[in-house]
Amino acid sequence: MTDQQPVTVTVTGAAGQIGYALLFRIASGAMLGEDVPIRLRLLEVPAAVRAAEGTALELADCAFGPLVSVDVTDRPAEAFDGADVALLVGSRPRTAGMERSDLLEANAGIFGPQGRAINDHAASGVRVLVVGNPANTNALIAATSAPDVPRERFTAMTRLDHNRAVAQLAARLGCRASDVDGVSIWGNHSATQYPDVTHATAGGQPVPTLVEQDWLESEFIPRVARRGAEIIDVRGASSAASAASAAVDHVRDWVHGTPGRWTSAGVASDGSYGVPEGLVSSFPVRSEDGRFSIVQGLDIPAFSRARIDASVAELEAERDAVRGLGLLG
Ligand code: NAD
Ligand code: LMR
């Protein structure tokens, strides 16, 4: 028996494909630790509540040590009540004939109310990870709708892009992913993102001395930036297990820290590296004492600057579109 208070973890879109890959990892202790009791709250739309209840039955059947309880609901206020960690996975996918502004508006209709429910019902130290696309702007909408929650508690997932970049480098260099450090994802979780190896090392050696610039420009950067589309093309569905794994990595590092290394996350900009304050942009980050901080003092060569600026311009356009729809307050 443990006398530790359970941690409440809320997962939206629980009946979706990422939810199905994610919930079992969380319940097993992979995200917060095997000794941390977890209370799961699953939020779904009414039509998918029964499917989420089916997943809850399977979770029970795993007899995971950390899992204390699973509740399924279609009511945000109930789902986020006392939430310590909120994983916002459920979103409105883009369908045929939908303009980008339609997509932003439809998602604002989800992330606005969820942000308000987090504001009103979550635990005071809640940490929010937005996975549902467009993740950065959805995180901005949710954060704007939760004025009482510090902005730094709303993050967007670019850890999958980070992991993809690390894996591509390791494959190229014939080393293990764990030998690679100092990779940075900048900007939006979209094809404009900039996977940056300027400060990366592999086995302690600077990556720019180990790979050719031509490979970086013509293969590595587009491969990482378009990996989501490649997965959809080859698998016939968007990434699920890798996305779930990245979400586990993101929250684990946020809670437990990143001693001696860095990672990437979408966080509210404080103006670092010329990224307008408030935009939820990916940066290289470290985590210490339960807080992410943007890695400071990195040299940004002209090649990197142009790519960061292009992705940040896309984030500004998304923010302006949402603001133009009157959805940012
Ligand atoms: P999915 O369609 O399989 O599941 C989404 C689930 O969300 C569905 O069960 C749906 O009913 C639910 N949902 C919709 N609106 C909801 C709401 N208001 N409240 C609660 N639940 C709601 O999709 P998926 O494959 O699990 O992907 C989920 C999202 O994650 C998509 O937007 C996808 O593009 C995104 N994604 C992001 C990354 C990343 O790196 N940031 C990676 C992969 C996928
Ligand atoms: C991914 O990076 O795999 C996803 O964001 C792709 C998508 O459009 O769902």
Image (tube, grey):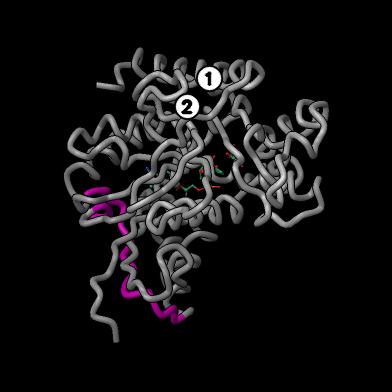
On residue 99, the disc is 1
Q: Is residue 221 visible?
A: yes
Residue on which disc 2 sits: 103
Q: Is mark 2 within 8 Å of ligand 1?
A: no
Magenta-drawn segment: 63-80
- Residue beneath the point at 42% across and 42% down: 130
Ligand 2 in which quarter: top right
Q: Secondary structure at mark 1?
A: loop
| Pointer 2 with pointer 1, Cβ within 8 A | yes
Give the crowd class for mark 2: few <14, some 14-19, many >=20 residues within 10 Å: some
255 is within the stretch colored magenta? no
- Position of residue 144 in the picture relative to residue 131 (left or right): left
Q: Position of residue 163 (x, y in %)?
A: 62, 47
> Mark number for residue 195?
none
* Quadrant housing residue 196: top right
- Residue 67 part of the magenta-drawn span: yes
Q: Position of residue 328 (x, y in %)?
A: 29, 22
Q: Residue flagged by tag 1: what amino acid is it? A: Glu
The answer to whether residue 16 is visible is no
Per the model, the C-alpha gap separating discs 2 and 1 is 6 Å
Residue 166, horizontal then vertical, whole percent: 67, 46
* Image quadrant in which the N terminus is located: bottom left
Residue at screen point 76% across, 26% down: 217
